[in-house]
Amino acid sequence: MVANRKAKDADFYNQVYLNGGQNQMYKVSYQDSPYFPIWKQAIEALEMNDKPKILELGCGVGQFAQFLFTYPIDRYMGIDYSEEAIKQAKASNPSHKDCFIVDDIYETTWLDSDYQIVILFEVLEHLEHDLAVLDRIKKDSQICLSVPNFDSASHVRYFPTEQAVIERYQHHLQIETISTFPISQKNKLYLLTGVK
């Protein structure tokens, strides 16, 4: 469902991350994040046995990366266009601070690099051209993404049902699984895994 609004600029997100987000969720450890149950299922769904190369688009403050670094991975790169998000990601992942860069998701050359898995948690609903981003991902890459069922000031779109998620993305990747996670009494996130 389209929310009929333009995508927010980096300054908007800089302020969100600086303020810590709703209930200070961007200031807590990954285990205390409301997204942690989704991240746990995502890790279980991903093929982590072969020490993969992972690209996270819209990495935010690096909370999922912090969790990911507890697993053996070959390489991780997280990009976000919020300078404040990247600053916080580097601070909370000091041993991996070189793994986070400020970059534009539409223009990044990292989508042309060597990776096996692409992560897009709570990203696509903020992008006017979400399908163009998916189309740039290399063939045979694993994709793991989450999107919401609710509107927000920063959402360009949201998805009332799992079927709405499938209809939006089924022609841009081969969907393998979709799960629903309640994050409040009425708000849910959909976790989708698939292959490009």
Image: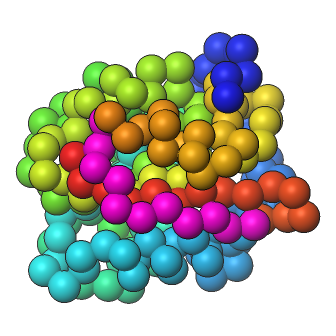
Question: Is residue 45 found left or right of 55 in the rendered image?
Answer: right
Question: Is residue 189 found left or right of 75 in the rendered image?
Answer: right
Asked which quadrant contains residue 38, the reply is bottom right
Q: Does the rendering let one see residue 119?
A: yes
Q: Position of residue 78 (x, y in %)?
A: 36, 52
Q: Position of residue 148 (x, y in %)?
A: 67, 48
Does residue 96 lie above or below 194 as drawn?
A: below
Residue at x 34%, y 61% (from the top left corner): 176
Does residue 89 lie above or below 57 as drawn?
A: below
Q: Position of residue 66 (x, y in %)?
A: 46, 73
Who is closer to the viewer here, 142 or 24?
A: 142
Q: Does the rendering let one see residue 92?
A: no
User: What stretch of residues is rendered in magenta?
Assistant: 172-182
Residue at x 73%, y 58% (from the top left corner): 188
Residue at x 18%, y 53% (from the top left corner): 141
Question: Is residue 74 found left or right of 9 in the rendered image?
Answer: left
Who is closer to the viewer here, 187 or 88?
A: 187
Asked which quadrant contains residue 5, the reply is top right
